[in-house]
Amino acid sequence: MTRRVLVINSGSSSLKYQVVDADDGTALAVGLVERIGATGGRLSHTTAGQRHVVEVDVPDHAAAMAAMAQAFAGYGPELADAGLVAVGHRVVQGGEAFARSVRIDAEVLDTVIGLSDLAPLHNPANAAGIRVAMAQFPDLPHVAVFDTAFHLTVPPVAHTYALDRKIAAAHRIRRYGFHGTSHAYVSRAAAAFLGREPDQTNVIVLHLGNGASACAVRGGISVDTSMGLTPLEGLVMGTRTGDIDPAVVFHLARTAGMDIDAIDDVFNKRSGVLGLSGRQDMRDLVDAAECGDDAARLALEVYCYRLRKYLGAYAAVLGRVDAVVFTAGVGENSAPVRAGALAGLESLGIELDPEANQVRSSEPRDIATPGSRVRVLVIPTNEELEIARQALEVVDSRG
Ligand code: AMP
């Protein structure tokens, strides 16, 4: 019997959904409701190769969920006959409470809401999506899959900030890490690609999308990752600074008179490659750099240099590295970024094959030279499939 999962990613102003066949990994329907709580709401729903786009009035998440249900009824597949066995919800911040995916009950939902101070933009929106989905599908088990859970294995030496310990404890300040479903999926897929058992495989995963993070995975377990208390830390991203001296905050407050919200906005939304070059999309950035735009060239160099530093750091953390794995929008598609990130790392045993790097494909592939001690892989991520699989695991473990 085919087993399908409705995967829901509920954000503050959008609701993404997919019906995923957890056995063969296909998506039967993919949809997005945008502009929740604003005017000009829009729903797109793709199924059987056809994309339907309609204007919808979505004042809140309940209306978005109703719009989604209507799209299924109008365009298919009919949800009642789709073989749904669970609803899987992406939840951004699980704190120290959730080391793995869990079936959602009132207590779990309360805990998710209680973690909102750590993820004020995400957890309340995730919780709103869970509430309305549980009302819409009361007979299906609902499972929360956390972005942070994969990283709860990161040891204290790597997750502890050298901050006054009482303050850190009182406010739950530590490194949590994000993109966990992607790092879990991709590190396992990398081991399978190499024909090795995950518990015998050490990889460095570079999830390079609009948000970006690196993860050191030893024997299938996350031992360090570049995002921290929030997704701001680490790599240079589309609009986020990544690592920056925290004293820049004091400096801006004192000398520019900026308040905390304004600085938050600059660091999270107006920095990264966008802030450096005026271009957020890596395709535009690479094109501009190739056309001689100095700001774009520097942005690209800063982006790649940060990646090289993390690769060196995680090679030191892991000792033995079997593969460096690129994934997500930039990692899967941008040959210049891959080449820039790996330039000069031959002493670490990492040798990129320039021709293999140029090949465009949506398949997992090895782009290292035959003699490279460390393999260099490109593995497309699939967070929805990972959420679907984890949801099924939870449902199965309950019998
Ligand atoms: P994601 O967050 O994984 O969806 O990745 C989105 C980002 O991937 C976009 O902002 C682009 O910068 C980047 N991207 C998508 N397609 C390409 C491509 N063909 N070449 C370079 N970058 C790409």
Image (cartoon, grey):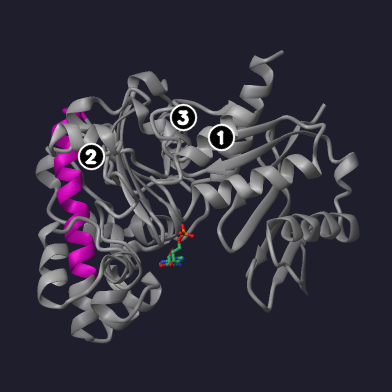
Q: Main secondary structure of the magenta part?
A: helix
Judged from the image, the secondary structure of the residue bearing numbered disc 2 is: loop
- Between the C-alphas of marks 1 and 3, the distance is 37 Å
Q: Mark 2 and 3 residues: CB-CB less than 8 Å, in contact?
A: no
Q: Quadrant of the N terminus?
A: top right
Q: Bin the neighbour count of mark 2 within 10 Å (Cα to Cα): few under 14, some 14-19, many 20 and up.
A: few
Judged from the image, the secondary structure of the residue bearing numbered disc 3 is: helix
Q: Bin the neighbour count of mark 3 within 10 Å (Cα to Cα): few under 14, some 14-19, many 20 and up.
A: few
Q: Amino acid at mark 1?
A: Asp
Quadrant of the displayed image that contains ligand 1: bottom left
Residue for badge 2? 371
**Magenta span:** 300-320
The structure residue drawn at horizontal position 62% and vertical position 23%, both measured from the top left corner, is 393
Residue 97 in sight in this render: yes
Residue 200 in picture, x, y percent from top left = 34, 19
Q: Quadrant of the C terminus?
A: top right
Of the numbered discs in the image, which one, if any, rests on residue 110?
Answer: 1
N-term mark: 2 or 3: 3
Residue 69 in picture, x, y percent from top left = 82, 54
The structure residue drawn at horizontal position 37% and vertical position 70%, both measured from the top left corner, is 282
Q: Nearer the viewer, mark 1 or mark 3?
A: 1
- Between the C-alphas of marks 2 and 3, the distance is 20 Å
- Between the C-alphas of marks 2 and 1, the distance is 53 Å
Q: Is residue 91 left or right of residue 19?
A: left
Residue 255 in picture, x, y percent from top left = 10, 76
Q: Nearer the viewer, mark 2 or mark 3?
A: 3
Residue for badge 3? 192
Judged from the image, the secondary structure of the residue bearing numbered disc 1 is: helix
Depth check: 308 or 264 in front? 264
Residue 46 in picture, x, y percent from top left = 74, 61
Residue 316 falls in which quadrant of the image? top left
